Amino acid sequence: DTGVSQDPRHKITKRGQNVTFRCDPISEHNRLYWYRQTLGQGPEFLTYFQNEAQLEKSRLLSDRFSAERPKGSFSTLEIQRTEQGDSAMYLCASSLPSGGDTQYFGPGTRLTVL
Amino acid sequence: ILNVEQSPQSLHVQEGDSTNFTCSFPSSNFYALHWYRWETAKSPEALFVMTLNGDEKKKGRISATLNTKEGYSYLYIKGSQPEDSATYLCAPFSGSARQLTFGSGTQLTVLP
């Protein structure tokens, strides 16, 4: 399967713990995006990379969130000191370099913070 | 942050009915409009990317139209089937936001 993959698919953690999610994009895509989706809402943009460079980050994103894409391939999203409000579906997508190009989504990581 | 509105929020139709949804978005600085279908427990699936005013795209029983001057797009499903049950999301890409801004979606349930 050559689609976008995410790991883990589900994560349950206690408040205050750190969590890390991984995204493997489609191999020829050099843009990678992270979104967060909560119940009843559409995906909300968090950040995106072109190759290894993080080009944009949502102003709504807390400092507890950090993302990396060290070799321009897979990416990780870390949430430090998780809070119950961080419970959501975290989606990753990848695309070719044009800003209007189709983004291909992974299945998401469902985070539950107890 | 762009204001993207989708209506209705949810919709139940009988198998065989045709239906349509609306997506409205700011018309200024428009670049492209994306439609996605998101079935439960699956990845969001791209349906269309539309860029030109008056554009109309079709994929099987699903079609979409675009009006960039007034800032809206319609998605039509002809002869709905139970497998069409999903949340349909629209997302404009604008020169100002420089990323996709999703609406809250229309949740469609097609009853057999």
Image (cartoon, coloured by chain):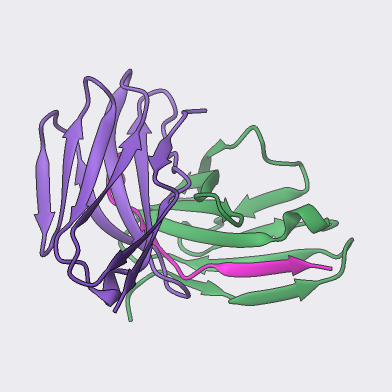
Magenta stretch contains residue B87: no
With respect to residue B53, does A24 lie above or below?
A: below
Quadrant assignment, res A4: bottom left
| Horizontal side of residue A75 vs B86, given as left or right | right
Q: Is residue A104 visible?
A: yes
Q: Residue at x 50, y 49 (%)?
A: A42
Q: Is residue A96 visible?
A: no
Q: Which chain is purple?
A: B
How many marks are shown on the rendered structure? 0
| Horizontal side of residue A108 vs B78, given as left or right | right
Taking depth in this image into account, of A26 and B11 the one nearest to the observer is B11
Report x, y in % for residue A102.
Answer: 28, 51
Taking depth in this image into account, of A102 and B81 the one nearest to the observer is B81
Give the drawing colour for chain A: green
Q: Residue at x 68, y 40 (%)?
A: A61
Write down the region rendered in magenta: A96-114
With respect to residue A23, does A36 lie above or below?
A: above
Report x, y in % for residue B6.
Answer: 40, 41
Magenta stretch contains residue A101: yes
Taking depth in this image into account, of B104 and A56 the one nearest to the observer is B104
Report x, y in % for residue B10.
Answer: 43, 55
Q: Residue furthest right?
A: A16
With respect to residue A107, does A64 lie above or below?
A: above
Report x, y in % for residue B29.
Answer: 32, 20
